[in-house]
Image (tube, helix red, strand yellow):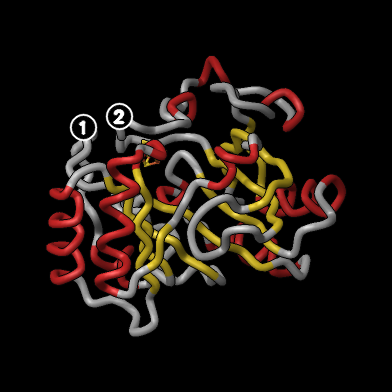
Amino acid sequence: MSTYPVNDLYTCVQGEGVQTGVAMVLLRLHGCAVGCPFCDTQETWLVDAANEVETMAAAAGANARYVYLSAAQIARLIQVNHPGPKWVLVTGGEPAQYDCGPLVAALHQMGLKVALETSGTEAGHVGAGFDWVCVSPKLNMPGGKVIRPEALAVADEVKHVVGRPRDIEALDALLTAVPLKDDVQICLQPMSVSQKATALCLEVVQKRGWRLSVQTHKYIGVK
Ligand code: SF4
């Protein structure tokens, strides 16, 4: 039976990207080796046995604790404690380092739709049956992980964090190298809500007919 290290589970509203504003249950899986300097969930990076706990209540919150749960246990917790949203957002950490198939199947059995946020450096989501895949490609990060073409090829949304013009150039090179879905949506997201990055993103999305992704949760004061 597959189990997943769960770092957090709560009801929220998707704050960024194409699904902005949609009520979702956020399921944060623990563990990530990508090492983005701007990561706002650095507490999820290291799967340290010293931080493993026995219950979801003990793991919950922004901390380094996690609990191993089966797909069925996760689905049941969501059914009981988070009955409102029609969507579950699986994020991390890097959730695609795990085989996501059993998790998606269990959530589908509960009648839920399942979205994913991944860095594109792992492929555990390929063929897993997600209803929405958002790849936020993390290029040239300290962890040395590379974008896997098969991970990007199934994206419904490519959400790229942009700080400087060279981030756009890196995205262009990536999009040229990998075949994408015909209807994929490209979103540019200003890094750390900086004004300079926002101006650059605005200019490029208007030129190319792409989308701007603003981290609305940072404006309305929710996580
Ligand atoms: S891939 Fe995501 S979780 Fe991992 S370091 Fe980068 S921003 Fe953080």
Q: Is residue 88 visible?
A: yes
Q: Is residue 122 visible?
A: no
Image coords of residue 112 (percent x, y): 72, 66
Report the mark closest to the observer, 2 or 1: 2
**Local crowd size for mark 2, using a 10 Å CA cut-off: few (<14), some (14–19), many (≥20):** few
Q: Could you tell me which quadrant the C terminus lies in?
A: top right
Quadrant of the rendered image holding ligand 1:
top left
Is 118 situated above or below 36?
below
Q: Residue at x 31, y 69 (%)?
A: 206
Is 108 situated above or below 38?
below
Judging from the image, what secondary structure is the residue with disc 1 in? loop
**Where does label 1 land, which residue?**
142
Q: Residue at x 42, y 25 (%)?
A: 46
Q: Is mark 2 within 8 Å of ligand 1?
A: no
Q: Residue flagged by tag 1: what amino acid is it?
A: Pro
Q: On the picture, is 110 further left or further right than 179?
A: right
* Residues at circles 2 and 1 in contact by the CB criterion of under 8 Å: yes
Image coords of residue 183 (percent x, y): 39, 82
Q: Residue furthest top?
A: 50
Image coords of residue 159 (percent x, y): 38, 58
Report, in whole angstroms, how far the alpha carbon at label 2 lies from the one at label 1: 8 Å
Q: Residue at x 21, y 32 (%)?
A: 142
Judging from the image, what secondary structure is the residue with disc 2 in? loop
**Where does label 2 land, which residue?**
37
Q: Residue flagged by tag 2: what amino acid is it?
A: Pro
Q: On the picture, is 40 further left or further right than 34?
A: right
Q: Quadrant of residue 205?
A: bottom left
Depth check, front residue: 25 or 169: 169
